[in-house]
């Protein structure tokens, strides 16, 4: 009976938006193309891909490393998902920590954990638990910040660079994706270089490792082999996945924020009056076959 009531409530809640577009609904021109060289496609053994958007503007040195590693096909031999820790992260790369990096990859680039930046184009109403504010970049990334200092937050699906103890900053050869409640204490301590935009279930549904920190313990637990990691720009044109982010610099996105902060009846009885940045990640979608979106270069 409870499931029937919930279904009925959801149906009622969705009836009006179907008839009348909400103020928070995006227009076709609000969807902006993500450049192919910002899309990283990881194919896993057994089938399935994990597609990531790279934060090239926010963490350029680490992203440059990741692009070089992908072009060198570094992950294709011996690469694997070797750590899956429940409610935390799935991590991949070279579990032996002995594979040489390509000569043009910086083993310890400058820390890109935070930076001085322009004011976000939109902000959440309430103060962030780990920062003075939560908001959004013009190019569709979630932000946390204090004053003019800002950083990418550790939310579900965000991708970070694994590292040793400081002063190590991580080469980008070993990466992880958040697969649980946002571990925001990691903010400003590790470089966040991207976000999984498709296929997060390929990582979050993997068996949890029983070793320390979720590492797989051989021989009982076998890491998931990586078949290939490629930039979309290096794939044949017919095989490239195309994605778009939703523009954040317009009244419709501002209304979307309000809708995320104040869920409405009939299902929601008490509006929260605010939202965690991790519960209001800017939308990203596959590009429709015939898209009217503005190109990344045009904005």
Image (cartoon, rainbow, N blue to C red):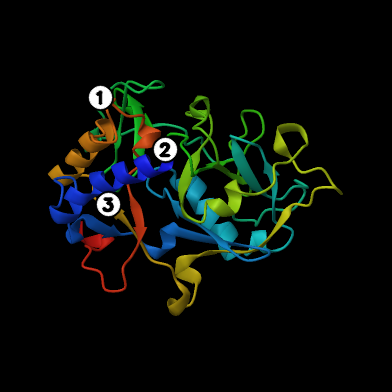
Is 292 in front, or is 232? 292
Q: Which residue is mark 3?
A: 246
Question: Image quarter for residue 46?
Answer: bottom right
Q: Looking at this view, is 140 or 224 the one in front?
A: 224
Expressed as whole percent of the image width and height from the top left, the position of residue 255 reads 17, 40
Q: Secondary structure at mark 2?
A: helix
Disc 2 designates what residue? 2
Q: Residues within 10 Å of mark 2 (few under 14, many from 20)?
A: few
- The residue indicated by pointer 1 is 273
Q: Residue at x 24, y 36 (%)?
A: 266
**View extreme (front): residue:** 1
Q: Position of residue 249 (x, y in %)?
A: 19, 44
Q: Identify the residue at image location x=63%, y=66%.
A: 47
For numbered disc 1, what is the local secondary structure?
loop
3D distance between C-alphas at marks 2 and 3:
35 Å
Secondary structure beneath label 3:
strand
Q: Nearer the viewer, residue 257 or 67?
A: 257
Q: What x and y, as percent, mark residue 295?
A: 25, 63
Residue 59: x, y in percent?
Answer: 44, 43
Seen in the image, is 168 located left or right of residue 40? right
Disc number placed over residue 62 in the picture, else none:
none
Identify the residue at horizontal 80%, vertical 48% (top origin): 221
* C-alpha span from label 3 to label 1: 23 Å
Mark 1 crowdedness (10 Å alpha carbons): few <14, some 14-19, many ≥20:
few
Point out the tag, 1 or 2, that comes first from the N-terminus.
Answer: 2
Q: Give the quadrant of residue 49.
A: bottom right
Foreground label between 2 and 3? 2
């Amino acid at each position: 009976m409870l499931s029937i009531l919930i279904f009925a409530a959801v149906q009622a809640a969705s009836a009006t938006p179907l008839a009348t577009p909400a103020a928070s609904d995006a227009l076709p021109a609000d969807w902006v193309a993500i450049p192919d060289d910002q899309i990283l496609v990881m194919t896993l053994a057994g089938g399935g891909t994990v597609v990531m958007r790279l934060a090239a503007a926010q963490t350029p040195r680490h992203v440059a490393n990741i692009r070089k590693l992908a072009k060198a096909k570094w992950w294709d031999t011996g690469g694997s998902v070797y750590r899956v820790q429940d409610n935390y992260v799935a991590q991949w790369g070279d579990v032996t920590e002995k594979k040489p990096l390509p000569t043009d990859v910086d083993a310890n680039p400058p820390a890109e954990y935070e930076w001085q930046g322009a004011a976000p184009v939109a902000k959440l109403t309430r103060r962030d638990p780990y920062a003075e504010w939560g908001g959004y970049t013009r190019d569709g990334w979630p932000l946390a910040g204090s004053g003019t200092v800002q950083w990418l937050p550790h939310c579900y699906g965000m991708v970070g660079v694994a590292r040793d103890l400081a002063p190590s900053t991580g080469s980008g050869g070993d990466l992880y994706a958040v697969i649980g409640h946002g571990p925001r204490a990691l903010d400003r301590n590790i470089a966040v270089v991207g976000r999984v935009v498709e296929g997060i279930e390929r990582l979050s549904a993997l068996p949890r490792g029983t070793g320390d920190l979720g590492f797989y313990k051989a021989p009982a637990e076998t890491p998931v082999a990586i078949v290939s990691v490629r930039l979309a720009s290096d794939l044949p044109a017919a095989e490239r996945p195309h994605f778009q982010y939703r523009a954040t610099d317009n009244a419709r996105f501002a209304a979307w924020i309000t809708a995320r902060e104040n869920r409405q009846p009939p299902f929601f009885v008490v509006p929260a009056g605010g939202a965690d940045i991790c519960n209001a990640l800017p939308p990203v979608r596959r590009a429709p076959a015939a898209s009217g979106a503005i190109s990344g270069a045009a904005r």
